[in-house]
Amino acid sequence: MTTTALSKNCVDASEIRTRFCAALSAMYRAEVPLYADLLDIVARVNAGAVTAAPTPARVEIERHGAIRVGTAAELAMMGRAFAVMGMAPVGYYDLAPAGVPVHSTAFRPVEEAALARNPFRVFCSLLRLELIADPALRAEASAILDARRIFRPEAVTLIERHETQGGLDEADADAFVAALLETFRWHEEMLVDRETYERLVASHRLVADIVAFRGPHINHLTPRTLDIDAAQEAMRAQGLEIKDSIEGPPRRAIPILLRQTSFKALSESVRFAGDAGAPGQHTARFGEIEQRGAALTPKGRALYDALLAQASAGDAAQPYTERLAQAFIAFPDDLETLASEGLIYVRRMGDMLEPLTYEDFLPVSAAGIFQSNLGNEQRETYGGQSSQAEFEAALGRTVLDPFALYAAMAEG
Ligand code: OOG
Ligand code: NI
């Protein structure tokens, strides 16, 4: 078969991504009914926020999700699966300094047309087994992970077919979406018994979330809101147990990076291996909302980091939101200055300045999300080296540099 013959019948990668995202959303709504409530709230807030402007079709569509895998082989196959959907690994996030024994990347579309079609991205973390302190538990966890198979054989076959043919036809694309979806499904039946589960939790709750299960269940999905402050109030009013404050920068005239908030992780029932008794409880899955702003240049990012650090180090008696707002007075808040000082990426359309949207994640914020959803009991951090090289060796390729991608889009 020639490439031309195939490309006529083959489904566009963005279309496969869109189908997968829709299937994942439907599955997660069914698995976590509170998430369906969250989508309703966001739809209501978005409808209120766009009354003046024409309403885009379902703006509150999911913008990101997150998963956590256990081994290099799982990560490498995950990377190949995302490639079928036009998603490449962008950026390296080391969560160890925040007390979480994983490192991560974001799989996302990188080209402008693909981002415009559907910017859906997935934060994917890899367990760092070497950060499990007890050598016996580390060996046990490693053996459990090596024995599990998180991908359906059909999914692997279709990934390979995609690689050799350069695409998938209609029937194969749908079969791929259905088979890959199984990897993200929740499994109530654990791989381990109660005693092992408890030892894993004692090492770190996240270690248990990765090692004890048959697969890397999607742990949250995040729709977009047009007004995160209003959405947060609406979540609170509806009785959702939400985080104290919105993560990221404060509310501004020109939004930067992203702001996000979530409802706390649910307690869900699980069944331990070889245990016919009462089910146990596991806390992992939640729902989150986000609002995105302009992508920061390295200079803008350095200023952002400095102001965030200043706000965190401020007077603890003063509410964090106030400290944050005060610190960010030093961050210009009009397009001309942001552009002329080189703090954000922009494009000039005639006389008009257009900021480029931030398409990635906040490292600090990501850590906050992990922590707040795990309960605040595990705050100690891990020492040791950040190891992008090890992560890339596991993935089987290098990750792309987000700043380089924005710079190219700003010029292009
Ligand atoms: C991923 C946390 C990162 C975000 O929005 O910053 C993330 C996880 O909990 O596995 O999704
Ligand atoms: Ni998230």
Image (cartoon, rainbow, N blue to C red):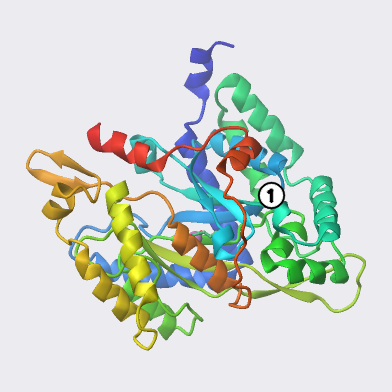
Residue 230, quarter of picture: bottom left
Location of residue 274 in the rendering, given as x and y in whole percent from the top left corner: 92, 66
Count of all numbered marks drawn on residues in the image:
1
Q: At 33% across and 54% down in the image, what residue appears? A: 57
Q: Is mark 1 within 8 Å of ligand 1?
A: no
Q: Is residue 373 above or below residue 61?
A: below
Residue 175, visible in the rendered structure: no
Residue 254, quarter of picture: bottom left
User: From this viewpoint, which residue is outermost toward the left?
Assistant: 351
User: From this viewpoint, which residue is outermost toward the top?
Assistant: 2
Location of residue 400 in the rendering, given as x and y in whole percent from the top left corner: 46, 37
- Split into 4 quadrants, where in the image is the N terminus? top right
Q: Secondary structure at mark 1?
A: helix
Residue 372, quarter of picture: bottom right
**Left or right of 73: which side holds 349?**
left
Residue placed most toward the observer, 205 or 119: 205
Q: Label 1, on which residue? A: 182
Q: At 41% across and 50% down in the image, what residue appears? A: 360
Residue placed most toward the observer, 140 or 185: 140
**Left or right of 71: which side holds 44?**
left
Q: At 14% across and 59% down in the image, what residue appears? A: 334
The amino acid pointed to by label 1 is: Glu
User: From this viewpoint, which residue is outermost toward the front?
Assistant: 384
Q: Is residue 9 above or below residue 159?
A: above
Location of residue 377 in the rendering, given as x and y in whole percent from the top left corner: 63, 78
- Split into 4 quadrants, where in the image is the C terminus? top left
